[in-house]
Amino acid sequence: MKRPLIRDSRVQAALPPLVVGVAVLSLWEGACRGFAIPEYLFPAPSVIAASLVQNGPDLLRALWSTMRVTLIAFALSTVLGTLVAFLFVQSRFIERGFFPYAVMLQVTPVVAVAPLIIILVRDTQVALVICATIIAIFPMISNTTVGLRSVDPGLANLMRVYRASRMQTLLRLRIPSALGYFFAGLRISSGLALIGAVVAEFVAGTGGRSAGLAYEILQAGFQLDIPRMFAALSLITAAGILLFLAMSGLSRLALGSWGDPERV
């Protein structure tokens, strides 16, 4: 009897954004047709969809190139960020000494750092991954560190009373308490990894079969093929939404309604 209720709640949650999306696209299409706006200035959704179909193979190949960099950077930021958070929790001195440098990575514009990384690293794909990882790693460090420290004081005192080791406290108390924060960090980091990959591709400006969607946008701009530019942008947007939904689904699958800070 619970399954229909779950399905109804999911439909109710998905219905408002769908209605808004359809309304916006309809107004966009109507405005472009009503005011006869040239497609080289601001194309209608129907023109963008036609360009997406026409240039589908090239755009999908570029999408895969961008997503490959994104997923590798996301995996690296997850592993490295979690390890750094574990290290911070073990020592306040280490956290106070290194956390400002983690903040420095976050606040430094990747556009300013990417050219240097691309020059120093000969392999362009590796350079793109490094740039995307720099952007995506901070939410994993910050969220996981906060989660590992956000333990119930009573439970922490109980672990001390029973003389639990640091490893036992970490495995049985801190990690379960941090899972909600960890998955929240995943949702943020996945989108930032995609942003970092696209920005790094803009700076690198690499072409060929390994070119990503940023290069397709640059080429479309040079050729004044604005519908193709919007088609590439729509793929980037769709990829970001799918990444967020995948991380949200993984969070619900792992935690349900327990331990997720967004559900408190």
Image: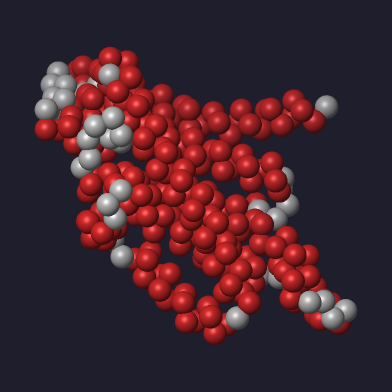
Q: Quadrant of residue 113?
A: bottom left
Q: Position of residue 70 (x, y in %)?
A: 42, 44
Label total for image: 0
- Give the vertical position of 55 relative to 122 (above or below): above
Seen at 39% across and 32% down, the residue is 64
Q: Residue furthest front?
A: 122
Seen at 31% across and 65% down, the residue is 108
Q: Position of residue 81 (x, y in %)?
A: 52, 61
- Residue 146 visible to an observer of this rendering: no
Q: Residue furthest bottom?
A: 93
Can you say which quadrant of the picture contains the N terminus?
Answer: top right
Nearer to us in this view, 167 or 263 = 167
- Give the vertical position of 14 relative to 29 (above or below): below
Nearer to us in this view, 213 or 224 = 213
Q: Position of residue 230 (x, y in %)?
A: 26, 29
Seen at 60% across and 52% down, the residue is 183
Seen at 34% across and 66% down, the residue is 107
* Left or right: 94 as drawn, with respect to 68: right
Q: Quadrant of residue 50?
A: top left
- Residue 18 visible to an observer of this rendering: yes
Q: Quadrant of residue 238?
A: top left
Can you say which quadrant of the picture contains the C terminus?
Answer: bottom right
